[in-house]
Image (cartoon, rainbow, N blue to C red):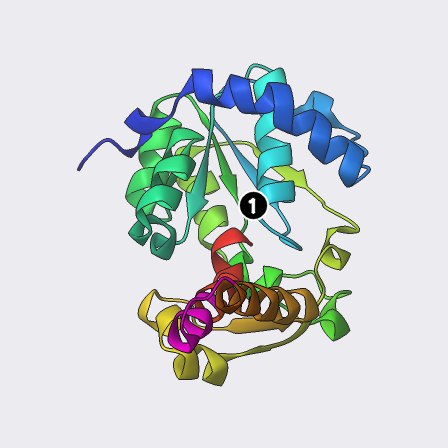
């Protein structure tokens, strides 16, 4: 199989850690404890998923970088169907969510970040913010046993309120077509998402563009949240 880990760029990660990490800590008032449990070597870093790539994934990425860990993260295959997005995440260590990719990472003496709940957990509605289980996802446990890899549990609290989800629907994913085509089974609706797509659509038309282009821009923005959560 193609070596998925080859695209990771230590220089790129170092640059991001230098300017993005201080911003994340300040804007989202991030507090960290127990980071001494992060140690170099093959391990499974298992975390709950309340928000998304910007805060949760990047925070763990930067903490691991500061501790000298080489870490890769399992990601939904839909992420790699978007050219520029795929390239960015490949450079920070994203690999396809598969047993083959996971085994490759662990064989290279690196750590593997997994959000077992995936989008199903990250896109749960505000009414279920207190529910933080992923009992349906057990593949990570099989990986730990098969590869005799230690498990480092990580718990995020407070991140579900960054952009609260009003509801998540399988039917909405099908109606919008694009999410379903990219493999997103449950699609979310948040107030910020709706307002942003409306603002973008109106902004495009405000520049003199035709109605269809404004609707298209709004539609694309509306469909974007699952890729960044």
Residue at 49% over, 69% down: 205
Region of the chain picked out in magenta, as a range:
207-217
Decide which of 66, 100 is in the foreground and name it.
66
Q: Residue at x 47, y 55 (%)?
A: 227
Q: Is residue 56 left or right of residue 26?
A: left
User: What secondary structure prevails in the magenta region?
Assistant: helix
- For residue 72, say whether it is visible: yes
Q: Position of residue 175 (x, y in %)?
A: 42, 84
Left or right placement of residue 188 versus residue 130 in this view: left
The one nearer the camera, 154 or 212, is 212
Q: Quadrant of residue 63?
A: top right
Element under disc 1: helix
User: Which quadrant does the C terminus fall into?
Assistant: bottom right
Please give the count of numbered marks on the rendered protein: 1
In terms of depth relative to the viewer, which is nearer, 73 or 134? Answer: 73
Q: Which residue is mark 1?
A: 53
- Residue at image coords 62%, 71%: 194
Counting from the top left corner in percent of width and height, residue 128 is at: 73, 71
Q: Is residue 190 left or right of residue 206?
A: right
């Amino acid at each position: 199989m193609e070596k998925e880990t080859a695209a990771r760029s230590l220089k790129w990660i170092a640059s991001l850690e230098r300017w993005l990490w201080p911003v994340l800590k300040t804007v989202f008032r991030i507090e960290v404890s127990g980071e001494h449990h992060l140690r170099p070597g093959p391990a499974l870093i298992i975390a709950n998923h309340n928000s998304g790539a910007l805060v949760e994934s990047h925070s763990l990425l930067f903490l691991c970088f500061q501790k000298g860990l080489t870490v890769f993260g399992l990601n939904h295959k839909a992420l790699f169907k978007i050219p520029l997005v795929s390239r960015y995440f490949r450079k920070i260590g994203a690999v396809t969510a598969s047993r083959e990719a996971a085994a490759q990472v662990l064989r290279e003496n690196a750590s593997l970040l997994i959000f077992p709940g995936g989008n199903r957990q990250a896109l749960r509605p505000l009414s279920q913010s207190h529910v933080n289980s992923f009992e349906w996802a057990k593949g990570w446990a099989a990986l730990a046993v098969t590869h005799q890899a230690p498990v480092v549990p990580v718990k995020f609290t407070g991140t579900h309120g960054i952009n609260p989800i009003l509801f998540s629907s399988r039917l909405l994913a099908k109606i919008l077509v694009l999410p379903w085509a990219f493999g997103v089974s449950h699609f979310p609706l948040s107030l910020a998402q709706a307002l942003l797509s409306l603002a973008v659509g109106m902004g495009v038309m405000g520049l003199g563009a035709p109605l269809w282009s404004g609707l298209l821009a709004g539609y694309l923005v509306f469909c974007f949240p699952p890729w960044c959560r």
